[in-house]
Image (cartoon, rainbow, N blue to C red):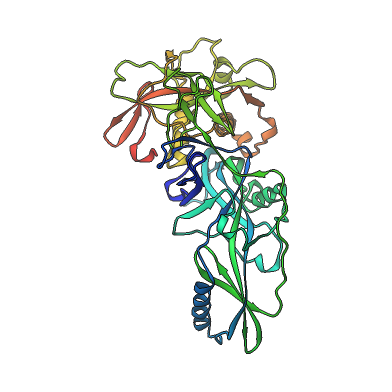
Amino acid sequence: MIIMESTRPNEDIKVNCPQCGSPINFPESYRSIRCPYCSKVLLITSPNRVLKFYLNTELNARSIKYITERYCKREGLALPKSMEKLALYYVPFWRFRGLQYWLKVRTDTYEFEDGTRLETEAKVQIDSKHFDINFPASEIPWMRDLSLGIRAQTIELCPDLPVKLRELAEVIKPEIVMDTAREMAYNSLGRLSRNPSACYEELIGEKLTLVYFPLWVSQFLNNSGNFYLLIDGVSEQASSHFEGEFKEVMESDSFEGVGSIKIVPHHCPHCGADLTIDGESLAFLCQNCDRFWYLEGSQLRQVEVTTAKFDGSIDSKYFPFWRFEAIFNGERSILTFQQAKTLFTNKLSLLIDEPTDSIFKFYIPAFGLKNPGACWTLATNLTRSQPDIELSETVPSHRASCTLPEEEAAQLAGVLWYYLIFGCAGHSLRKSFNRDEVPDIHFRPGRLTYFPMKEDGIYLCEQTTGFAIQKKGVI
């Protein structure tokens, strides 16, 4: 997914090596790792679209007693006489993350001294924002005010409940199902109906995760009776307290559609040799049989890779782009350049001189960028220019990682389609835009194409078109 540096999750996943059993920690975004103990090459797969994780906690009865005394002093409460009961609950939270793009119409109005008003022609703009929403997945009353929040420290995510806590912890069953959780997240995003200037919006790389959060509930006895304190098992801070009776909760049953990540040997499906390790990359080269593999869910799929030929690209590094061809208007025919030229008019480069039967292609950056705006600019410029390039079926040795999934790239190509169509619409259509009036398209499976990009001062220039982005914007 396209991730801004300021929003990159400060989270590590903790697993045990399937070969030697040693603990391994790695960033949540990683897809391939090497065990530091036995050097086994491992692949991180996601058999389920919705994953679950457990957060670890290091608290015990002694530390909880200290936290309770500190909380009572701060809140001006009487110190408890004794601890009657201590329970650890793993409470479920739904977490919804992704990137939201939307098109909006901007019309500037100028008022002159004589009272006349001039309204400029409506312009189409693209905007984006990352979102990270979480809310309790259970309707237990004392969970309503809880939140995963933003943590300064690195959070340790475990695919399974930590062994040391299995006998002590009670896991609460989620009461809010996945479809309802997704709908609740949509409603809190500030959707299209709440933004009158937006004419189209799309969510890219939306990811729903079930996170089990450790909450300690300690029961104390003081002068007024039972006293319950809720303690955050991650930050190790008391969050709230209440008096009276505490409603017990039931442990969890299995929850369909949610699974854990799987750690498997990272081998070439064809020859069995170890594949390359590249952290966040979704694409891997087998250096034994020269086949190129793409990780899709829990399976490695062989893909064809092409590289743009360019004279003078010896010192360049090659960056991956997803290249899509569009099926136009629900028909079997592919969108050609001539059709695109008729639809997009002034949104295509004036320098293009393509034959009428050439296929129109959408180009989406597949490498990591800190700013969604930079990704959008590069995708728009490359697609509008329709570079006339010669392709070779080779994998460049000096290449950047492919970190954007094909599915998300296709979604972004869909946004680009609406942008090109709507940006060329007449003044009246821009003010009364109807998405249903736009010709429908869908995309053929994407192909990875590597383009040479060369450093030029603070910029990184794409060599076939000359478009540039700042080097510091590349992850």
Question: Can residue 394 be spotted in the picture?
Answer: yes
- Give x and y (percent) for residue 159: 57, 48
Residue 464 lies in quadrant: top left
Residue at 54% from the left image edge and 10% from the top image edge: 356
Residue drawn at x 45%, y 55% as measured from the top left: 154
Q: Is 446 or 328 nearer to us in this picture? A: 446
Residue 111 appears in the figure? no
Residue 237 sits above or below residue 372 on the image: below
Closer-to-camera residue (350/110) = 350
Q: Position of residue 391 (x, y in %)?
A: 43, 14
Q: Is residue 244 left or right of residue 15?
A: right
What percent of the width, then of the height, locates residue 161?
A: 59, 54
**Relative depth, front residue between 75 and 114:** 75
- Please give left or right for residue 104 compared with residue 186 in the image: left
Label tally: 0
Residue furthest left in the image: 457
The answer to whether 251 appears left or right of 388 in the picture is right
Quarter residue 430 falls in: top right
Give the answer, above or below, for where 301 lies relative to 433: above
Q: Give the residue furthest to the bottom.
A: 223
Vertical placement of residue 340 versus 16, above or below: above
Q: Check the image and report above or below for 388 versus 110.
A: above
Q: Position of residue 342 (x, y in %)?
A: 58, 19
Point out the image quarter for the C terminus.
Answer: top left
